[in-house]
Amino acid sequence: MIARLFRKEEYHVPEHVMSFYASLDALCDTILSVNKSIQSVSVINKMGRLVENASKPEVAKKHAEYINEHLLMQCVLQISMGKDFDDVYGPINYHISERANLTMITFPVEDHVILVTCNKNNSPINLAKKIVSTIDSHRKQVSLIEM
């Protein structure tokens, strides 16, 4: 989303910034393809602002209705407050919130939080573990490219 908005020659955006956002775009698409129950993937910055988003076509309109600023800030706040206990319990791998209509799973990634929404057809813990594995694989690929 962000990477598509900026053209390097128009805004003089540094190459490493373009590559970072292109990487997030690719990560969203990869996570979206992990399981058919995943409806959307959003990347949120530490200020609670949407940075990148990918949704399945059938839920794209519905997604826009419920993803708002307060929800995004809540996701960032949950992960941020949980970091206070990293020294005692270890870092957060993911946070699951089950609601009547959907499941939301958040993942801390660098200075961002990834919010994944999915319908309730699958085990959220198994799905979360698959997504953590996908995020780890993506990190390794990006690290290799940057070397």
Image (cartoon, helix red, strand yellow):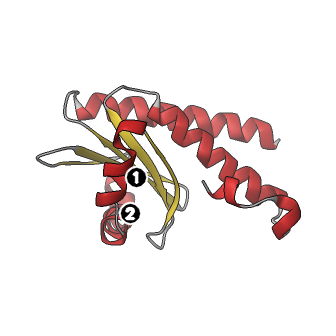
Residue at horizontal 79 percent and vertical 56 percent from the top: 16
Are circles 1 and 2 on residues that touch, CB within 8 Å?
yes
Looking at the rendered image, the quarter that the C terminus falls into is top right
Residue at horizontal 23 percent and vertical 27 percent from the top: 122
Q: Would residue 96 appear left or right of 79 to someone viewing this image?
A: left
From this view, report whether residue 95 is shown above or below residue 29. below
Nearest the viewer among 67 and 23 is 67
Q: Could you tell me which secondary element the residue under label 2 belongs to? A: helix
The picture places residue 79, in percent across and down from the top left corner, at 36, 61
Q: Would residue 128 appear left or right of 27 to someone viewing this image?
A: left
Q: Label 2 is placed on what type of residue?
A: Lys
Q: Could you tell me which secondary element the residue under label 1 belongs to? A: loop
Which quadrant of the structure image shows residue 75?
Answer: bottom left
Of labels 1 and 2, earlier in sequence is: 2
| Residue 91: mark | 1
Location of mark 2 (residue): 83
The picture places residue 89, in percent across and down from the top left corner, at 32, 53
Q: Label 1 is placed on what type of residue?
A: Pro
